[in-house]
Amino acid sequence: MTVLTGSGLSAESGVPTFRDAQTGLWANFQPEELATPTAFRRNPRLVWEWYEWRRKLVAAAKPNPAHLALVELEQGVPRFTLVTQNVDGLHQRAGSREVIELHGNINRTKCFEEDRVVTDWPDTDEVPPRCPHCGGMLRPDVVWFEEALPETALTLALERSADCEVFLSIGTSTVVYPAAGLPFHARSRGATVVEINPSSTPLTKEADYVINGAAGLVLPELLRRWRGGKCSAR
Ligand code: APR
């Protein structure tokens, strides 16, 4: 089984999704104003501070029943792979051991110039702070629009999508490629594709099963049925 998660999974932890018109993370900005290298060059302070706000939001959030159900599935299902577009680290905090992060992690910082991950830097009033190695600006280690996904993570995600029997797509609008291509890739290789989402997405018409509902309710219920032997998961 391969699972792809998106920001809808963390919605019930109080972390807003990206595209909700009123409360989403882009509510007051266009994504291109915040999450691109061009935006960072134009206004590094704005971008850094927006991520600081998100880091605090995520630090205060707790994994919800959907994250916990996926931990149990990882422990019980042979050949289980969890792929996430989320940068909040909530899967790991819930206890998931192997997580393929396609879009990086907001809790890591890297150098904008040299791309190396930086864990410590001298105290400073400068925003954003500077890389202690080369003096370049520091930025969050997440994938922005116009940037490539980490190659190893994407290759593994494609492989695991191609060779699973069941593919679950949970809490993602399925619009941001290449991640959005994974369920379609799985389906073209013969997997049974299940979507869990309260709203429709471009995947809805193509999926074998669609469960219209919040992940925090649907996943624990699926788990209960699976434990009771009423459904199989491979
Ligand atoms: N349970 C399941 N799904 C939910 C829930 C919930 N409780 N609440 C909302 N959703 C669904 C929404 O219906 C929507 O389809 O989650 C989806 C969230 O979609 P987006 O906001 O577009 O988030 P995501 O798909 O993760 O975005 C992909 O875009 O900008 C980038 O890098 C960012 O990783 C992100 C990527």
Image (cartoon, rainbow, N blue to C red):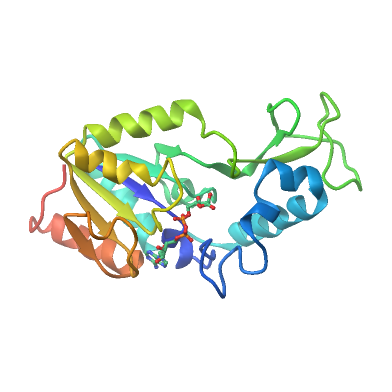
In the picture, the quarter occupied by the C terminus is top left
Coordinates of residue 9 in the picture (x, y in percent): 41, 59
Residue situated in front as seen by the camera: 208 or 14:
208
| Quadrant of residue 226 within the rendered picture | bottom left
Horizontal arrangement in the rendering, residue 2 relative to residue 124 (left or right): left
Residue situated in front as seen by the camera: 101 or 66:
101
Coordinates of residue 130 in the picture (x, y in percent): 84, 36
Coordinates of residue 218 in the picture (x, y in percent): 27, 66
Horizontal arrangement in the rendering, residue 115 relative to residue 99 (left or right): right
Residue situated in front as seen by the camera: 160 or 145:
145
- Which residue corresponds to the image point at 39% horizontal and 53% vertical from the top-left? 174
Coordinates of residue 63 in the picture (x, y in percent): 46, 59
Would you place residue 13 above or below residue 68 in this image? below
Residue furthest left in the image: 230
In the picture, the quarter occupied by the N terminus is top left
- Which residue corresponds to the image point at 86% horizontal and 36% vertical from the top-left? 122
- Which residue corresponds to the image point at 55% horizontal and 62% vertical from the top-left? 61
| Quadrant of residue 217 within the rendered picture | bottom left
Ligand 1's quadrant: bottom left
Residue furthest right in the image: 125
Residue situated in front as seen by the camera: 171 or 28:
28
User: Total marks drawn?
Assistant: 0
Horizontal arrangement in the rendering, residue 139 relative to residue 15 (left or right): right
